[in-house]
Image (cartoon, rainbow, N blue to C red):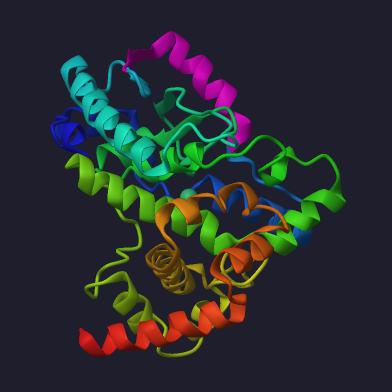
Amino acid sequence: MQGMDRIGRGRWLRRVWVLLLMSVMQDTALWAQRGLQTGAQNGARVDWRADDPARLAWLEAHGRRVSRTHVVLTVPRDSMHAAHQEALADSLERGLRALHELVQSPRTWQRHGKAAVHIVLAPGRFVSHANGDGTVFIPFSVAARGEAPYLHESAHVLLTAPAPFFVWEHDTPAARQVVGNHTAQWLLEGLPNVLAARAAQAAGLREYNLFATTAAGSVHATCAERTHEAPRAAMREAVGREGMVAGLNGEARGELAPAYYTCAESFVTFLVDQLGLQAVVELAPHMTGDTWRTALERLAAASLEELQALWQKHLEAAARRE
Ligand SMILES: [Zn+2]
């Protein structure tokens, strides 16, 4: 984001955050699903959200808050010049306004409607995430590197339906299992990417793209290029399916995730081109449950398998053109 580019990098680098530069950026929805998997595998769950109250408490004492209409931005006050924070808040305000226009907020199912998104830059090493309260947590070190997924995480907030929506909001193991078995992981992550890129373009901002999903030109050509061979070819097949993707959060994540998330964005882009952005946004309240497939097939008047086959042809054509 433009405001962030103006931060005096040397100043904060000398501070404690320098210890935290190894932050691994993923995000909340992914992480939520991974927590489910991890729990199933070894009985332990790592919960980045568990520390959110402590982060907010620390910032109550050491943070500085700036408010706009659509965004509230809280940062550690000794780590960012006040003028930089104001500039970043202005940039984020433009980005959030563009996101709301794209999503056409408020929608009946939106948990937060047009309420301001609270973006928190906090010390520590953790995964960037949005919580169910409409707050986005991003490690300060990640933001200072210019790698904050501001609009992607904010899009998660705008696409949050009433609870129970995320896996952790379900009370019973059986209900959580439904989420694990049926979630449209590709839509959950692909749609925020599509919205973030479009909002950034509309608002004249730069949104960091972790997986460089347009590295080969279009997102379609990049997906095709990254899924030519095994084991990454399986990631293209996994996009569009129900449930969690095996292997995505294991040891091979570094190799598989760029392919999977690029292809997820590619498939969502394809659906948006075919069905319209508003129709695809209307799938959002279904995407962590077992009703999205029916809703999508009714909308497209085609089976999921037919849509996937059409998309694959589209991919190959895009790959030949570029
Ligand atoms: Zn995400």
Residue 188: which quarter of the image?
bottom right
Comparing 286 with 233, the one in front is 286
Instruction: Name which residue lies at 21% across and 34% down.
Output: 4
Comparing 55 with 157, the one in front is 157
Instruction: Name which residue lies at 31% across and 70% down.
Output: 219
In the image, the segment drawn in magenta is: 49-68
Comparing 295 with 240, the one in front is 295
- Left or right of 60 in this view: 34: right
Q: Where is residue 203 in the image (x, y as percent from the top left)?
A: 21, 40
Residue 240: which quarter of the image?
bottom right
Instruction: Name which residue lies at 60% across and 33% down.
Output: 132
Evaluate whether residue 126 shows in this view. no
Q: Position of residue 67 (x, y in %)?
A: 33, 15
Comparing 77 with 153, the one in front is 153
- Left or right of 172 in this view: 62: left
- Left or right of 110 in this view: 45: right
Q: In which quarter of the image is the C terminus?
A: bottom left
Instruction: Name which residue lies at 39% across and 54% down.
Output: 193
Residue 177 position (above or below residue 130): below
Classified by dominant secondary structure, the portion drawn in magenta counts as helix
Q: Position of residue 3 (x, y in %)?
A: 18, 31
